[in-house]
Amino acid sequence: MEKHSTLRGVALMVVAMGVLPLLDVCAKFLGQGGIPILQIVWARMFFGAVFILPFALRAVGPRGLLPERPGFHTARAAFLLGSTGFFFGAITFMPIADSLAIFFVQPLLITALSPLLLKEHVGPRRWAAVAIGFCGTLIIIRPGLQDFNPGMALAFASGTCMALYMLITRRLARDEDPLMTTFHTSLMGAAMMSLTLPFLWQPPDAKEWGLLLLLAAIAVAGHFLIARAYTMAEASLLAPLAYTEMIMATLAGWWFFGEMPDRWTFAGVAILIACAIYISVRERVKRVTTAREFEQP
């Protein structure tokens, strides 16, 4: 039974990674149509909160909708807003797959920052994997060997914000339900972004409203699948599967926009994937070793 649960978790994670790049396709179409990036981010948060609201009400009732630790949720929402906004900005300058390749620096940043923010121990082998992974990022960006593209900096900033978002998520996951954490983050993100709307609002047409709603629905569905996957399989097994998103991102960019990453981007992504898998395996070995030591009389 446990084996079947693990396989379902892996399947859900792969499906989520196949769905999420379609969110970026919607965002790129909207940006090309003249909808401001911050308005697109607002729609992702606002409609996301609306879609999750019925499930949140069913789970905790009206009185349980207020967050117990608003500071953490506000910070988490701010980093998610930053990650989303920077990434949507990046794909206006670069192909979706190239932007995602640089964004994939975030698992390495999580490893590098966890000793500072979560007081977790990172051994020399994992530090070496982080260093090699950054070399993979440099291969993708190739500073000095190609013209600077603002999308590169935006994609890296997006990955950095996502790393901080995930670190706060890891902290909250110890005490709070993933559904409510997602709802509170979407709600606070929508509240923050709503303050900007009077200064940038561009009235969408019917097609653009449809894309805004679809974008939010894809985001909610993708993150729900990820949350479900993590209830069925170990994080160390699922984490490397996030890189399968690159496959769908490449196909989506080619199909909708005629974009295709070059060979250096694929080489850099291969290095990042190898380092992320190694870090994940080391994390799993460390956890198993710690559990055995704890069980010993």
Image (cartoon, helix red, strand yellow):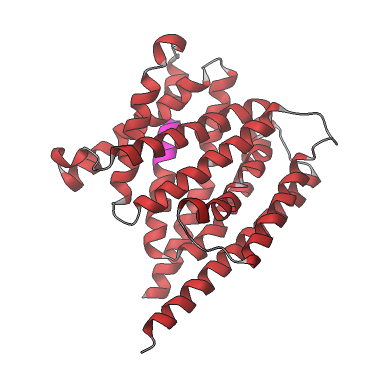
What's the residue at 49%, 78% (across, down)? 289
Magenta range is 214-220
51 on left or right of 92: left
- Up the image or down, 1 lies above or below 47; here it is below
The quadrant in which the N terminus is found is: bottom left
Residue at position x 75%, y 39% in the image: 141
Left or right? Give the position of 58 relative to 8.
left
Q: Is residue 170 visible?
A: yes
x%, y% of residue 270? 71, 55
Quadrant assignment for the C terminus: bottom left
- Seen as rendered, the residue at the extreme bottom is 297
Residue that protrudes farthest toward the right in the picture: 145
- Residue 202 visible from this viewpoint: no
Q: Is residue 231 above or below residue 157?
A: below
At which x and y percent is residue 231? Answer: 36, 61
Q: Residue at x 27, y 42 (%)?
A: 69
Out of 240 and 247, give the one closest to the viewer.
240
Snapshot quadrant of residue 153: top right
* Quarter of the image where one finds residue 97: top right
- The verdict on residue 59 being magenta is no
Percent x, y for residue 166?
Answer: 46, 48
Is the stretch drawn in magenta largely helix, strand or loop? Answer: helix
